[in-house]
């Protein structure tokens, strides 16, 4: 089973991905892949809507190519991606893929700003932003989280809100993913026996 962990910037996607490190997933940090493609082809995307569509197509290609590989169902992919919308999941064959979203729709902009600043390591991209830019980014990501929460409800996709008790919510999300993986494995074995 593959996993897509999507959602707002600094909601815990990479942290959750690292929590799953020992579970055998190959981790794709899609933000880095997007940056590499943009640099290589001198592309600029003006909106997250454009990026969401393009990255959904790339993720689908990776998943589909896995099916034609000798590693079929032996290699599990984990996609960590900040700029994808639930509506664009129709571009991805999610038959063998679990998708969850993380956000902080209930966060206060001022408190979330302080939380980021208090936990900013020098290598994190947010540490390089001035206060005004980060404050604007936090407000935009709270609005993005609200949109994600609504869309997830509409499309029946799991959404985990990390506004409060972030570590506990991420632990819950990890347990949810591992539970779904066990169910997936059980169902896959049953289907193989039936065939």
Image (spheres, rainbow, N blue to C red):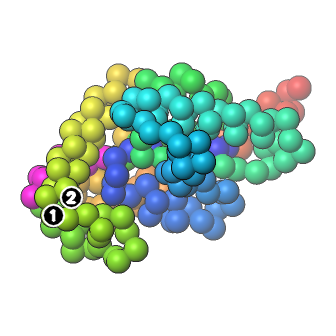
- Within 10 angstroms of label 1, few (less than 14), some, or many (20 or more) residues? few
Tell me residue 84's x, y (percent).
44, 36
Instruction: Looking at the picture, tell me which residue is in the foreground, 54 or 145.
Output: 54
Residue 132: x percent and y percent?
13, 58
- Determine whether 98 is above or below 178 in the image: above
Q: Which residue is mark 1?
A: 131
* Pointer 2 with pointer 1, Cβ within 8 A: yes
Would you say residue 61 sits in the magenta stretch?
no
Picture coordinates of residue 56, whole percent (x, y) = 55, 33
Q: Provide the major secondary structure of the magenta segment.
A: loop
User: What label does residue 68 carry, if any?
Assistant: none
Q: CA distance from mark 2 to mark 1?
A: 5 Å
Q: Residue furthest front?
A: 42
Of residues 135 and 177, the one drawn nearer to the viewer in this rendering = 135
Image point 27% across, 73% down: which residue?
119
Q: Which residue is mark 2?
A: 134
């Amino acid at each position: 089973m593959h996993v897509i962990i999507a959602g707002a910037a600094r909601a815990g996607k990479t942290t959750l991905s690292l929590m799953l490190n020992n579970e055998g997933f190959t981790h794709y940090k899609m933000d880095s892949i997007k940056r590499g493609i943009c640099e290589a082809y001198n592309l600029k995307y003006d909106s997250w809507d454009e990026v969401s569509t393009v990255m959904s197509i790339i993720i689908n290609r990776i998943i589909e190519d896995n099916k034609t590989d000798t590693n079929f169902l032996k290699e599990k992919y984990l996609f960590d991606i900040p700029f994808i919308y639930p509506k664009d999941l129709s571009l991805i064959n999610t038959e063998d893929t679990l998708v969850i979203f993380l956000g902080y729709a209930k966060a206060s902009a001022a408190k979330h700003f302080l939380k980021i600043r208090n936990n900013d390591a020098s290598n994190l991209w947010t540490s390089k932003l001035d206060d005004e830019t980060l404050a604007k980014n936090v407000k935009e990501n709270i609005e993005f989280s609200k949109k994600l929460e609504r869309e997830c409800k509409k499309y029946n996709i799991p959404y985990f809100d990390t506004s409060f008790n972030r570590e506990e919510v991420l632990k819950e999300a990890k347990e949810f993913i591992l539970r779904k993986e066990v169910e997936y494995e059980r169902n896959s074995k049953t289907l193989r026996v039936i065939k």
